[in-house]
Amino acid sequence: MAIARLGSVSLDCDDPRGLAEFWAKLIDGQIAFSSDDFVAIKTDHLWLSTVRVADFRAPTWPDGTRPKHIHLDLAVQDLEGAQEAAVMLGARVATFQPSPALWRVMLDPAGHPFCLSTQIPD
């Protein structure tokens, strides 16, 4: 039984609106929600979001001086239960939690961040 479903892919950036407009046109998505720091794009198969990150610097590729920036958002029904299950599988709860009532930032076993959220529509 799945603990979560992949709900959204989030792209860190310094201009969420501009990046969202690019992606919405590229993948024929529609901007469904927008704020200064977050924009959600709905597609037929997935949500794509753009998220403002303080002091964002674009990744360098292929040299990797600054690694790529992407994280997964997983849609869950029960934040507490999903967090417990993820920890049992090897995840860690991130120290910084910007909005723990709405989503939980977790770290996978390799340290990659991902979020558990009850805020992602079907």
Image (cartoon, rainbow, N blue to C red):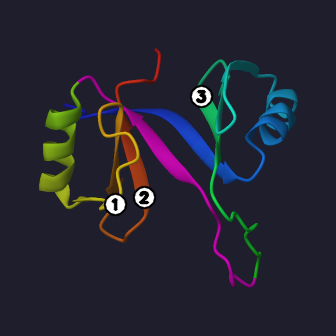
Q: How many marks?
A: 3
Q: At 25% from the left edge and 33% from the top edge, which residue is drawn? A: 2
As helix, strand or loop, the secondary structure at mark 1 comes to strand
Q: At 39% from the left edge and 45% from the top edge, which residue is drawn? A: 115
Q: If you read the primary sequence from the N terminus, does the residue marked by circle 2 or circle 3 appear first? A: 3
Residue 7, percent across and down? 47, 30
Whether residue 87 is in magenta: the answer is no
Prevailing secondary structure class for the magenta stretch in the rendered image: loop
- Residue type at the position of mark 3: Trp
Q: At 24% from the left edge and 59% from the top edge, which residue is drawn? A: 91
User: Can you identify the residue that label 3 sits on?
Assistant: 47
- Residue type at the position of mark 2: Pro
Residue 52, percent across and down? 66, 48
Q: From mark 2 to mark 1, how far is it between C-alphas?
A: 4 Å
Residue 15 lies left or right of residue 70; in this view the side is right
Residue 72 lies left or right of residue 77; in this view the side is right
The tag on residue 87 is none
Tell me which corner region of the image, top left, top right, bottom left or bottom right, holds residue 81: top left
For label 3, count other residues whose C-alpha is less than 10 Å away and answer few (under 14), some (14-19) or many (20+): many
Tell me which corner region of the image, top left, top right, bottom left or bottom right, holds residue 79: top left
- Residue type at the position of mark 1: Leu
The residue segment tinted magenta is 63-77
User: Can you identify the residue that label 2 sits on?
Assistant: 113
User: Can you identify the residue that label 1 sits on?
Assistant: 107
Tell me which corner region of the image, top left, top right, bottom left or bottom right, holds residue 93: bottom left
Q: From mark 2 to mark 3, how far is it between C-alphas?
A: 18 Å
**Discs 2, 1 touching: Cβ within 8 Å:** yes
Q: State whether residue 48 is above or below residue 109.
A: above
